[in-house]
Image: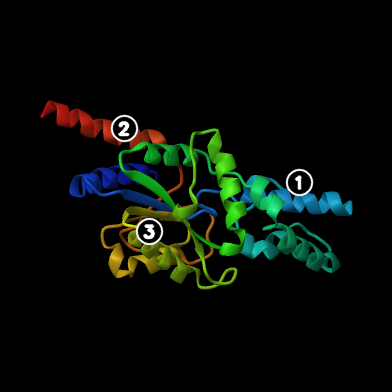
Amino acid sequence: MNCWMKRLAKQHRMMRTRHPHEHLAVVFDIDDTILDLRHMILNVFASFDRAHGTKYFRGLALHDIIVGETEIERIIEEARIPVRARRKVAQWFVEQAWSNPVVAWAHRPFEGVVEVIRWLQSQERTCVGLNTGRPEEIRAETLLSLNRIGRAHGVRFYDDLLFMSHYAWGERIPESKVEGIRYFQQQGLRVAAFVDNEPENLHSVAKYDGARDILLLHADTVYRSEREVLPAHAVSGTAYDVSRLARGHARKHELGKAA
């Protein structure tokens, strides 16, 4: 399951060899791919308890959250909250989860992912693009949050390398993902790989004519769509291990010197 970083290293080498003078892009989804939204969910539920003097979520831990933010009712039910209070909790979550302070300060990355992004950004003529289902209305907050996280690792995310959905919240996301890939290609970038947690998004990109040379990587974290729709050639993984990227390139360099 964790050979996916080795596959990414191999893909990067191959695309650099085939297209030595072009700029390559590795494109990432954000939520549940770069950012572990379980931290946000915990933060919002804890804020409900603080604001209302309740203890509904006092024992809730990160490993207890096995669904995404779109299936929050399941967590509310399992927390044994009185039926009369469930709607109030759900409404609080809707109001707070994507508020400016939460987006800017309560999001946390998966372990190792920022190091992987830094490694990619350090490679010759290689950039990291972001292709998210988030709507344009939270562009500023999204960049603020990601750059706050990346700053300590020497990583920076750029406005022109961030594609956001033109549709309403949660609508037509697979279609938007294809539009995102097309956006980066229209910027003159050669998209080498696309990383997303939702199988249906990878399925949609796989059907796009311009995606034939793109490595599809499935972040096997939390996802809503059926795994059965994952393209057969997609590679799944859970751990962002930058050492596998570095070793893959080091091995290529050693072989080149031996030749």
Question: SS at mark 3?
Answer: helix
Nearer-N-terminus badge (1/2): 1
Residue 80 place in picture, x, y as percent: 78, 59
Residue 55 place in picture, x, y as percent: 84, 50
Rounded to the nearest angstrom, the CA distance separating label 1 from label 2 is 41 Å
Nearer-N-terminus badge (3/2): 3
Task: From the image, tell me which residue sits under label 2.
Answer: 247
Rounded to the nearest angstrom, the CA distance separating label 3 from label 2 is 28 Å
Nearer-N-terminus badge (3/1): 1
**One can see residue 219 in this view:** no
Q: Disc 1 residue type?
A: Gly
Residue 150 place in picture, x, y as percent: 53, 39
Question: SS at mark 2?
Answer: helix
Residue 77 place in picture, x, y as percent: 73, 63
**One can see residue 17 in this view:** yes
Circle 1 residues within 10 Å: few <14, some 14–19, many ≥20: few
Q: Which mark is residue 222?
A: none
Residue furthest out toward the left: 259
Q: Nearer the viewer, mark 3 or mark 1?
A: 3
Task: From the image, tell me which residue sits under label 1.
Answer: 59
Rounded to the nearest angstrom, the CA distance separating label 3 from label 1 is 43 Å
Q: How many marks?
A: 3
69 or 257: which is nearer to us?
A: 257
| 18 lies left or right of 106 | left
Name which residue lies at 39% across and 44% down: 2
In the picture, the quarter occupied by the C terminus is top left
| 178 lies left or right of 103 | left
Q: Nearer the viewer, mark 3 or mark 2?
A: 3
Circle 2 residues within 10 Å: few <14, some 14–19, many ≥20: few
Circle 3 residues within 10 Å: few <14, some 14–19, many ≥20: many
Q: Which mark is residue 184?
A: 3
Quarter of the image where one finds residue 246: top left
